[in-house]
Image: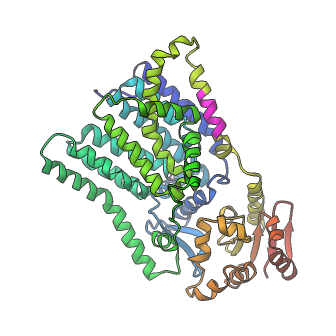
Amino acid sequence: MKSRAFFSGPSGARLAAVLGVSALLRLPGLNRPLLGNFSSLQIIYAMMARNFRDYSRNLFLPRLDEICAGAPCVRLLDLPLHSYGVALLSAASRLPVDMTGRLWSAVFSLLSVALFYDFVRQIWGEKTALASAFFFAFSPLSIIYGQSFQTDATSLFFLIAAIRWILLKERKTAPLLGAALAFALTLLLRIQYVFLFPLFGAFFLTEGGGFVTRAVRFSVFVVISVLPLVLWNLYSYHYLEAHPERVIMSIFHQLNTGTFSSYAPWSFFFLRQITVHLVKLLLNPPGFLFLLAGLLAPPRLKREGILYAWFFLTLLMLDALSKKAVDMNYYIWGLTLPASVFAAKALESLKGVWFKKIPAPGFVFPGLWILVSLSVSVSPAYHTPAGDRGVMEAAAFVRRTVPEGELLIASNGSNSNLLYYTGRRGWAFLITHRARDLSGYASFRLKDAPPDPSRQEYLKVQHDPVLAFEYFRSQGARYFVCSRPEDLNEEPAFGAHLRSHYPVLFESPVFIVFKLF
């Protein structure tokens, strides 16, 4: 089908309406602090963006606010192109980094909807494309992560671009190079999409032309796609070997500490949790029923086999990364793309059989659908948990009271968002055993990156809050701020140690600050 302008004709106007409503749904969350749903990850990206904007434009040393060996820690898990882009946009627009990061994701999520619509339109027609774009745009996952300071919206955009270029124009050189570069960016942002290489192999090897030519073109695509990722990881390993005390987290740390260990994919726990995620978050509960109907319908086009492969390869990725699929539901977002097409095809079939008998204005079905998705996504997308509301008050007090350049220890449960919002450098400290068990990224700070070249001293005390706290104080911390004072009661020995040795600078129901000198 010949490509036409996005917004031409009635379907184009409806697409514009979908994008407009999607944008309106993202607006209320743009100025919300990076607290609540997966704030640990968002704070890491925000730290790298702010440090890149304000301190160092070194692409190869993404810096955090935490201290390692007397200098800012670096994070080498991935090349944070997303954070760098946010930093440059923030510097140009003078918007806060937090808002810019959310705005960046919102824009890329809307661009993804438009690009996805164009891709589906050229294969399955305008009606299926419009319904697919609608399902994708108003998936609970899109509402939640289409405004989060994470790489997911950006990686999905480049993934759609790569698939679109290859599937529609795979025999031309420019689209081949464009697709390879787009998928290279996808892998730099989300390495887990390596599971889709068989899908691209099917694109190349099932089209016309000689087998050798097709195999060579696919090999070129693979090499260009993985080369930036390989080079980054070689650099990461080299820097880690030379400066182990500076690296707060790398892919090698993650592999060595077993963070990628999975729940058994055949266990009842995994199957129950992943089912809840798929039914509730993928397309919302009614949308999941449309998805099942679309999956069970007989394929009509040759290229629908590619659609099935796309869907089930992504399911295989979730199965292999079962811990991430359960604990970090943004990994499921990529599954929404093929799922939306299946659901759209089912809706198109049912409209002629069932929906014709129900007279209703054209906006009733879309309106009810959006309300169902919002009922699922309001809490993670727009709500700041009560336990995190002391963060902003504590951070504001620190910025008013603690001189710039002073190091501090900050504690807010199991993440480092308090340290970020204070605008000071120091250490994110986990007081309770529960926080240490749930910490995720924060656990690396305690286990793999003590702020001193000699790790042995810290490793002996890391599980004792009192000794670990004194270790950080000995490294130069001058203040301690805690936005969850109840944690001091949960660890009474640590709370008693603090109050008996250090004066309270300020105390309120939601935060407490100690002077350590």
Please indicate, yes or no, whether residue 7 appears anywhere in the rendered image: no
Residue 449 visible from this viewpoint: yes
Please name the residue shown 76% across and 81% down the image.
Answer: 466
Looking at the image, residue 39 sits to the left or right of residue 409; the answer is left
| Residue visible at 53% across and 32% down in the picture | 289
> Measured from the top left, where is residue 363 in percent x and y?
57, 20
Q: Is residue 370 magenta?
A: yes
| Rendered location of residue 479, percent (x, y) | 76, 75
User: Count of labels shown?
Assistant: 0
Residue 77, position in %: x, y?
47, 66
- Assign the magenta stretch its main secondary structure: helix
Residue 266, x across and y down, in percent:
50, 55
Give the side of residue 495 with respect to residue 363, left or right: right
- Left or right, 175 with respect to 237, comes to left
97 to 245, vertically: above or below: above
Please say if 499 is above or below 377.
below
- Identify the image's colour scheme: rainbow, by chain, secondary structure or one colour: rainbow
Rendered image quadrant of residue 299: top left
Q: Nearer the viewer, residue 276 or 446?
A: 276
Q: Is residue 277 magenta?
A: no
Residue bounds of the magenta highlight: 369-376
Which corner quadrant holds the N terminus? top left
Q: Nearer the viewer, residue 472 or 351?
A: 351
Q: Residue at x 70, y 63 (%)?
A: 418
Q: Between 307 and 79, which is closer to the camera in this rendering? A: 307
Quarter of the image for the C terminus: give it.
bottom right
